Amino acid sequence: MASFAVLADDSPSWRPSEYRVDVLGCRHVMSFPTAKLLDHEHRLAELKSEANPFALVTAAHLTALRTRRDVGRRFAAKRELVRLLYAQGWERQRVIDLFAIIDWMLQLPKPLEQQVWQDIETIEGKADMKYVTSVERLAIERGREKWMAEGKAEGKAEGKAEGKAEGKAETLSRQLTRRFGPLPEWVGPRLQGATADQLDLWVDRVLDAPNLLGVFDGH
């Protein structure tokens, strides 16, 4: 089994290369190679000229980071990327799939989105190739709206779950301290990395366990 991380954040200094966890005196470490997309920002023009679909996606991602607060620049950049996409001569399905990604990364206000679609209609008319039908256009727009809605819903659900688990961990830590006295260093990371179900189990064991290890035994 191998792991590889693609770092798509906007922080030049954030470069994790390993994951480690300490449990009951044991340390588990997993190191993995990474690719930092931000490192290729100086190659943006080169990426746009390459015939590699991943280069175009990387260019779209970097452009999205650059234009987060500038709708005008984002509009111009999106039009350019769409033209480059159609100029590659790729098969129809690849063009549709890559456009869906670019469209999701570089979202614009509705009036500007309409202008981008007009560009597509002009390009397809000149090249005599009808790639994006009205049905596919609707699917792309609905897909983008679905991704946005799902992202918001997942963020809220994860936030609620994390907050609930943190509250249980804090309560359990207080109960363990009252029952067994000052806690050793390994307990904190164990509580923080536990699932809600594990925390519930440990809470049930606090009163009956003969010692601290008895609370965590087997879990």
Image (spheres, helix red, strand yellow):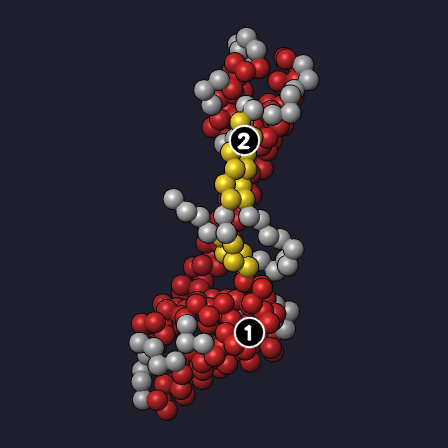
Cα separation, mark 2 vs mark 1, equals 41 Å
Q: Quadrant of residue 171?
A: top right
65 left or right of 81 in image: right
Q: Compared to 44, does 199 lie above or below?
A: above
Residue at the spot x=50%, y=24% of the render?
200
Q: Which secondary structure, mark 2?
A: strand
Residue 153 in sight: no
Q: Amino acid at mark 1?
A: Leu
Classed neighbour count for the residue bearing mark 1: other residues with Cα under 10 Å, few (<14), some (14–19), many (≥20): some
Q: Residue at x 41, y 47 (%)?
A: 2
Residue designated by label 1: 44
Q: Are marks 2 and 1 in contact (CB under 8 Å)?
A: no
Say which of 34 and 203 sits in front. 34
User: Closer to us: mark 2 or mark 1?
Assistant: 2
Return the residue nearer the eye: 109 or 168.
168
Q: Position of residue 83 (x, y in %)?
A: 45, 82
Give residue 65's position: percent from left, percent from top. Answer: 59, 66
Task: Return the residue found at the far right.
Answer: 182
Quick one: label 2, few (<14), some, or many (20+) residues within 10 Å?
few
Disc number at residue 217?
A: none
Q: Earlier in the sequence, mark 2 or mark 1?
A: 2
Q: Badge 2 is on which residue?
A: 27
Write the residue at 60% across / 25% down.
Answer: 186
Give SS at disc 1.
helix
109 on left or right of 123 = right
In the picture, the quarter occupied by the N terminus is: top left
Q: Amino acid at mark 2?
A: Arg
Residue 143 in sight from this viewpoint = yes
Point out residue 77 in the picture as x, y percentages from the top left corner: 54, 78
Residue 120, by quadrant, is: bottom left
> Which residue is located at x 31 percent, y 85 percent?
129
